[in-house]
Image (cartoon, grey):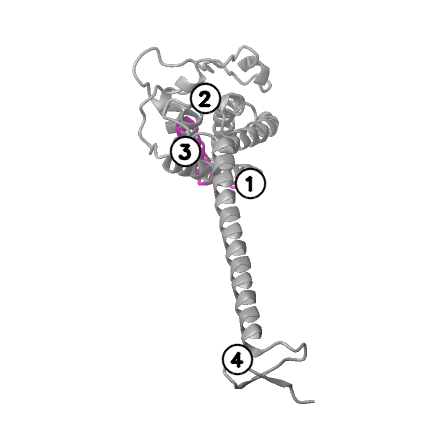
């Protein structure tokens, strides 16, 4: 049925809708509905933007509250990363030397594992220092980060591997100055490194094993101190893994040394 019409005030006829409303009234209703939709859309956009901003603000607040502070130069994290890097570098050097001086597959497997593991860990600690904006320079004494660590429960005699002399294992912190990394506990002296470089075959194996035992004893102590004193979770995790791994290796190294005749005298 065609829409009805009725005269307008000016004499023309308006088309009526099915409810009998003239066109002007229908247009007014349409404009009102459009304004209502615009208000609803604007309100939704504003609410969404407000929630987004609120989420960002809360995220920043919670992130700042849960993220640990960046370690400083005098922190356990920085001291451990610097000193253990140097410690690891010597272990890698000793392992490289013995790999060139023996065909014993057991010794080679142990040396290669120590070499690769400690290279990777040293790289990780190097990266942390760069990430923290500290670089690789030293501003604090060698082993200074361990000054408050109690070493009384870790007597070197506890790690005596069937007569292997553990004397000289000292966790002392330099009394003045920054000290030298070569003076860190467990580090082989230049004479001991020369003896390893000059040896061959079983003698090289024995020297390597006895030096690495001393090295590991100190490494365990350092790692345990970092695991107990660091605030940074990733540092504590790596230090704990180091302590656990090297403690387990000590038994293997001791057994291997005994099987090959024990430590070489005078080294």
Q: What element carries label 2?
A: loop
Marked residue nearer the N-terminal end (2 or 1): 1
Residue 71 in the figure: left or right of residue 231: left
Disc 3 crowd rating (10 Å Cα; few below 14, some 14-19, many 20+) is some
Q: Distance between the residues labelled 2 and 3?
A: 13 Å
| Identity of the residue furthest to the right in this view | 1
Q: How far apart are marks 1 and 3 (CA)?
A: 18 Å
Marked residue nearer the N-terminal end (2 or 3): 3
According to the picture, the residue beneath numbered tag 3 turns out to be: 89
Q: Distance between the residues labelled 2 and 1?
A: 22 Å
Q: Distance between the residues labelled 2 and 4?
A: 109 Å
Q: Is mark 1 on a helix, strand or loop?
A: helix
Q: Badges 2 and 1: C-beta atoms under 8 Å apart?
A: no
Marked residue nearer the N-terminal end (4 or 3): 4
Q: Which label was assigned to residue 186? A: 2
Q: Does the magenta stretch include residue 103?
A: yes
According to the picture, the residue beneath numbered tag 4 turns out to be: 9
Q: Badges 2 and 4: C-beta atoms under 8 Å apart?
A: no
Q: Residue 201: image x %, image y %?
A: 49, 35
Q: Badges 1 and 3: C-beta atoms under 8 Å apart?
A: no
Residue at x-position 46% and y-position 36%: 95
> From the image, which quarter does the N terminus lie in?
bottom right
For discs 1 and 3, the disc positioned in front in the rendered view? 3
Magenta segment main secondary structure = helix
For discs 4 and 3, the disc positioned in front in the rendered view? 4
Please indicate, yes or no, whether residue 110 appears anywhere in the rendered image.
yes
For discs 2 and 4, the disc positioned in front in the rendered view? 4
Q: What stretch is highlighted in magenta?
A: 82-104
């Amino acid at each position: 049925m065609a829409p009805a019409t009725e005269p307008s005030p000016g004499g023309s006829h308006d088309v009526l809708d099915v409810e009998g409303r003239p066109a002007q009234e229908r247009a007014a209703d349409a404009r009102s509905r459009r304004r209502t939709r615009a208000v609803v859309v604007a309100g939704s956009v504003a609410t969404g933007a407000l929630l987004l901003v609120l989420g960002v603000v809360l995220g920043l607040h919670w992130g700042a509250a849960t993220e640990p502070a960046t370690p400083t130069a005098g922190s356990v994290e920085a001291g451990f990363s610097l000193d253990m890097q140097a410690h690891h570098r010597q272990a890698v050097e000793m392992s490289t030397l013995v790999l060139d001086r023996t065909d014993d597959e057991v010794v080679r497997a142990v040396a290669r594992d120590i070499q690769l593991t400690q290279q990777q860990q040293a790289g990780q600690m190097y990266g942390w220092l760069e990430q923290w904006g500290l670089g690789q320079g030293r501003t604090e004494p060698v082993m200074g980060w361990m000054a408050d660590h109690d070493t009384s429960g870790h007597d070197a005699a506890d790690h005596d591997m069937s007569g292997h002399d553990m004397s000289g294992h000292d966790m002392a912190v330099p009394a003045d100055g920054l000290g030298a990394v070569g003076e860190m506990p467990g580090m082989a002296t230049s004479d001991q490194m020369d003896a390893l470089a000059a040896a061959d075959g079983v003698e090289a194996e024995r020297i390597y094993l006895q030096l690495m035992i001393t090295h590991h004893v100190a490494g365990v102590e350092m790692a345990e101190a970092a695991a107990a004193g660091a605030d940074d979770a990733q540092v504590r995790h790596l230090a704990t893994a180091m302590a656990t791994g090297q403690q387990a290796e000590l038994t293997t190294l001791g057994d291997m040394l005994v099987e090959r005749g024990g430590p070489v005298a005078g080294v």
